Image: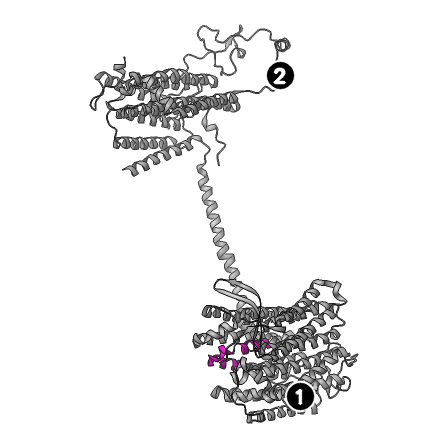
Amino acid sequence: MTTLHTVAATGALKLSWLLLAFPLFGAVVLLLGGRRSNRWGHLLGVAMPVAAFVYGLIAFFTLLGTSHRSQDLHLYSWIPVAGFQVNMNLLVDQLSICFVLLITGVGSLIIIYSVGYMSHDPERRRFFGYMNLFLAAMLLLVLGDNYLVLYAGWEGVGLASYLLIGFWQDRNSAAVAAKKAFIANRVGDAGLSVAIMLMFTEFGTVSFTGVFGTVGSAGSGVATALGLLLLLGACGKSAQVPLQSWLLDAMEGPTPVSALIHAATMVTAGVYLLVRSNPILALSPDARLAVALVGTVTLLFGGIIACAKDDIKKSLAGSTMSQIGYMTLGAGLGPAGYVFSIALLLAHGFFKAGLFLGAGSVMHGMNDEVNMRRFGGLARVMPITSVTFGLAYLAIIGIPPFSGFFTKDPIIDADFTEHGTAGNVLGTLALIGAGITAFYMTRMMFMTWYGRRRWEAGAHPHESPPVMTWPMIVLAIGSVGAGAFLIVNDRLQDFLAPVVGVPPESHGFFTAPGLVALAFALAGVALGWAMYGRTPVPSEASRGSLLTVAARKDLYGDAFNESVLMRPGQWLTRLSVYFDNRGVDGLVNTLAAAVGGTSGRVRRLQTGFVRSYALFMFFGAALLVFGLLVVRL
Amino acid sequence: MSHILAATPSGTNTDSIAVETVFWILAFISVGAALAMILVRRAVHCAIMLAVVMLCLATMYAMQGAPFLAFVQIIVYTGAVLMLFLFVVMLIGISSSDSVVETIKGQRAAAGLAAIGLFLILILSIGHAAIGPAARTTAANNVDNINLTGLARLIFTTYVFPFEVTGALLITAAVGAMVLAHRERTAPKPTQRDLAARRLVSGQLAPDPAPGVYALHDAADRPALLPDGSTSELSVSQTLAPRDPNEETPPVRPELPAPAVTEAES
Amino acid sequence: MSPIHYVALSVILFVIGGVGVLVRRNAIVVFMCIELMLNACNLAFVAFARMHGNLDGQVIAFFVMVVAAAEVVVGLAILMAIFRARRSASVDDANLLKY
């Protein structure tokens, strides 16, 4: 079990607040500047994340150069109440610096890409403002040194996600999708906030050092409760089952948004939360098993959905759901899985962002068409995009020596060594998932880039401008090499060991589960080629089997939510309104009527005759004297 | 005289037979007069009965060793205040009287009930209270054995502040009465010349005839008879309601409606 | 002949005066009944003075008389003003405070 020992920030890390300040400044200027900043807005919007990335690199190398790799920077005292002290502190340690580099690096690339992608949009400045806001909030999330600051960043990214999904304000579908995302996230947020409250009641503190230091004395019941609540929070933010329904709808937003928020960074916040809370999970095997179970269910869920979607972005979203399922599964395996979970997260950031940007490039060239049945044969027309897309494809399906092989297979491997028989079942399912991943990605490749051209009339696909292709190239390089860079020679493992612990002795790369996974992947590729590469793809979707129909309907996730949550909720509100109108209003009105009626009777005492008033006075005097008499007696 | 008026300091029954007899007689008279006061119809009769009660009370004050108060009662209360009442009765309506019918339902019954209740309670409380015999040193309290100087000593030493305040009250009351009774002139006061001019124009040069010319009736509210037998409204003051000149005297309940059998003569 | 007889008489006169206030309709008669009640109180005070053996009761009775006089003055002036305005001296006619 690891504990967190921090020292005060020194040297260059004392300016770590710049990481927040740059994007926040950009967001404020762009959002408050209004239309006046339209001309130069995108330049500022790009400069700020790049500046943050530069500082992130400086901080990373500073951290590498020192032996104190957990440094705490105190900004100010946020909640200085007796009995509940919360400071706005930034924790720069190994785990958070990985995320910082991912967020600012991939974020800068995507924002440079969106200069080109959003060039025709008159609201581009607002877009950059929101993106910078998102970056600031996400950085706050990963840099906070206590759960409350993390929660503040958590809520901030939720807000940014809402604003960005609903960016095109004239589209009703976008607004509905944004609301859905926010509400589903809210359910998860409830879990996280209850976890924080529980931490406060049990430990009196919510800072990482405080909680991880005292959680050992709290007993496994508290640890299990905390673990499950944190899992609920992670499910909401990372679109894991049962809170997965919003991710596919979130594709209503512009493609850079899907790439940055719903692939590379925001949806990984849940994994960050779980990995950061590893001392809590270490005390509760039940919570870990629950995490692994959720991850496994989700990776199958997402994979099956992705197989049936014709919309390229929705298919990629299903893929994201599935890959994050792998990461969650890794986070449920204890120290054996944390490192690989983070490694997969970092590699996924590269290849999934690359895939999304590629899809955006295709859409840009095909007049925002997303239906893959209208694509086909684009490889010759858009060569750069097809190559980068292809490299990311190879990475995701786990072909050595690309990233996915080095990062995904150790997770499957660790599956079989942990959790006993349950682990074996989960591992088998993960293997099947690998095959499904290969299938749907191959399907996507063949439907989009090869085969007959099924374009709409009037489509002129063309390669994207350099401002869009260069980020994709950089990301493709990352997709190719990131996995090997991180895993070979245990580089990431040694780096993160103080934070997440050391996995038990590794078995190398070509273990039995790893080879079986590779076999499944190749089988998936073969099936995909057989169904979509060899036979021509029909322009209209066929009726499909029962599973296909179900997968097209997101495996009835929406229907389930509606029937189990929405309709009872509506019934409840209608019932409440009924009770309010009849019950409460009835009560109030009856009371008013009673008072009115009584006063109508009582006012007849006011006859206007002085003599009756005199009579009352007389009686009153008699009563007074009588009272006096009684008292005196 | 003071030895008669002052109480004799001995025993429970401290007064002499004479005093006791006088008390009982006066008691009956005053209670009877009070009852009559609330029962008679005409306001003037009520005033007379009240005067009788006040005089009885004055005598009782004298019997209890308060000669000053007795005379003040007669002079101020009966002589001034009651006369004030009579003046007002004259102004407002000397013959105005209440009808027997009670307009508020249940008022008389309730009043009777309240009265009996209060009476019983008060009698109970004073019976229960420790009312001792007359104290021995009443006479000694009077400075130089004179009641008046004793009172004066008290008023101007212990009770000087209430005295001053009461003085202010009297002034305020007098000023207030003047303000209330004052009638603002809406037109300039007519001079003698204006009055004479008006009289010339009106056609009536002579003053109004005097009322009650007839030998049988000599009241201010009887109109005078003109030579042709008709009455002259000019002869009766407008504040008084003129009466039918052929009425018999004295009029008994002139405005009595048909005898109400339901209302008892209470 | 203890003072209690005087106090009892005072009680009787007070109650009679109270009944008169409640029963009579002519405003002046009502006023006179109030005067009767005040006089009854005076009698009681004088009886108490005799009982205690000092003159405080008499002084109070004296003040009561003074105040009663002032009250009569003002009250009758008000009555006159009302009569001038409404031509009626009945207390029942002043019933504008009716509900």
Tag 2, which chain? B
Q: Say which amino acid is labelled 2.
A: Pro
Q: Which residue is mark 1?
A: A394
Residue C94 is at least partly visible in this image = yes
Label 1: element kind: helix
**Distance between mark 2 and mark 1 Cα atoms:** 119 Å
- Give the residue displayed 39% in from the left and 34% down from the top: A616
Depth check, front residue: A199 or A367: A199
Q: Give percent across and percent down for residue A348.
A: 63, 82
Quarter placement of the C terminus of chain A: top left
Q: Which residue is mark 2?
A: B188
Q: Is residue A179 above or below residue B119?
A: below
Start-end of magenta stretch: A268-294
The answer to whether residue A168 is visible is no
Q: Where is residue A302, by image quadrant?
A: bottom right
SS assignment for the magenta stretch, majority? helix
Q: Nearer the viewer, mark 2 or mark 1?
A: 1
Describe residue A302's horizontal placement relative to residue C8 as left or right.
right
Q: Secondary structure at mark 2?
A: loop
**Where is residue A15 shown, x and y percent of the image?**
63, 70
Nearer-the-camera pick, B205 or C83: C83
Q: Nearer the viewer, residue A352 or A446?
A: A352
Q: Using a 10 Å C-alpha cutoff, classify the residue at mark 2 as few (fewer than 14 neighbours), some (14 to 19) or many (20 or more).
A: few
Residue A264 is a magenta residue: no
Q: Chain of mark 1?
A: A
Q: Amino acid at mark 1?
A: Leu
